[in-house]
Image: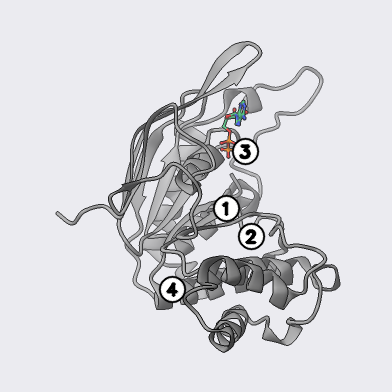
Amino acid sequence: MTKAHLELTGVEMAFDTPKGPFVALDNVGLKIKKGEFVSLIGHSGCGKSTVLNIVAGLLQATKGGCVLDGHEVNSPGPERAVVFQNHALMPWLTVYENVELAVQQVFRKSMAKQERRDWIHHNLELVNMAHAANKRPGEISGGMAQRVGIARALAMKPSVLLMDEPFGALDALTRAHLQDSLMDIQQELNNTVIMITHDVDEAVLLSDRIIMMTNGPAATVGEDLHIDLPRPRNRVTLADDPTYVHYRQEVLKFLYEKQRKLEHIAPRRGSQPAETTPETNSAQAARA
Ligand SMILES: Nc1ncnc2c1ncn2[C@@H]1O[C@H](COP(=O)(O)OP(=O)(O)OP(=O)(O)O)[C@@H](O)[C@H]1O
């Protein structure tokens, strides 16, 4: 068997709270191969960001831990780039300078000045943002800023790309465009990707595996679904593909039958049930 590129073993995460320790994660185990695209899905508050932050080295597990290429992860590192939902660009720097900042941090010693310049442009071109290199974040749209965030992460040549709902705040068309770009880039670079999403279609379309997490507290890996669909993937043709539909249903079943959030389903006094019903719009139901 090939050695795991990234491995989480027996991860427990307990947060100190005024009411005592709150166990968010319990015994989370996960082995990820180099170049795998893995999505984490689960109801709000189940611990997805906590898992990602442990892999990023931003949080230290209470028990167990994360090993990347044989080295224990206990602090952030440039080989694990993080893309957040709100892209977190420096507002006073141009698009070019935002990417430059990351490139300087990683390659100041190993790349000559001109080589760094070309590399920054190459990454902006990858996400179709070279034309806006001299603009500031306030002068570009949310989708464009998110593309810069992705370029900045990729420019660090990370072996692992960690994405926390990277497209969550975008409109549907921009999201679809960025999902397609991400699939192309990942095919080309073979980065390992761990992405948190609430969108079932996004998870099935992009992933090699979908890790479905149980509800917290003490959340863990509930199911590990392998998405065996050939690449490159096309969202239009896949929409009617029986295998795609099957995977989609497996995830929906997990979220809405096996891990149904009871407090969302119980009708509140004097109000309608808050949970979606089978009659509701399927696009709505697909947003966990
Ligand atoms: N620093 C903290 N102190 C106390 N509790 C925390 C802390 N960080 C997270 N938690 C709790 O741990 C649980 C998991 O949080 P986490 O943010 O990982 O969930 P999530 O699945 O990413 O949620 P969402 O989908 O809403 O972003 C939640 O109950 C949260 O309230």
Q: Are marks 1 and 4 in contact (CB under 8 Å)?
A: no
- Are there few (<14), some (14-19), or many (20+) residues within 10 Å of tag 3? few
The quarter of the image that holds ligand 1 is top right
Classify 76 as above or below 8.
Answer: below
What amino acid is at disc 3? Thr
What residue would you read off at disc 3? 277
Q: Secondary structure at mark 2?
A: loop
Q: Is residue 31 left or right of residue 184?
A: left
Q: Position of residue 4 (x, y in %)?
A: 26, 52
Q: Is residue 9 left or right of residue 86?
A: left
Amino acid bearing label 2: Phe
Q: Nearer the viewer, residue 200 or 224?
A: 224
| Residue named by callout 2 | 167
Q: Alpha carbon of mark 1 to alpha carbon of mark 2: how far?
A: 10 Å
**Residue 237 position in % (x across, y down):** 47, 74
Query: Does dot 4 land on a helix, a strand or a loop?
Result: loop
Of mark 3 and mark 2, the one earlier in the sequence is 2
- The reply to whether residue 237 is in sight is no
Q: CA distance from mark 1 to mark 4?
A: 17 Å
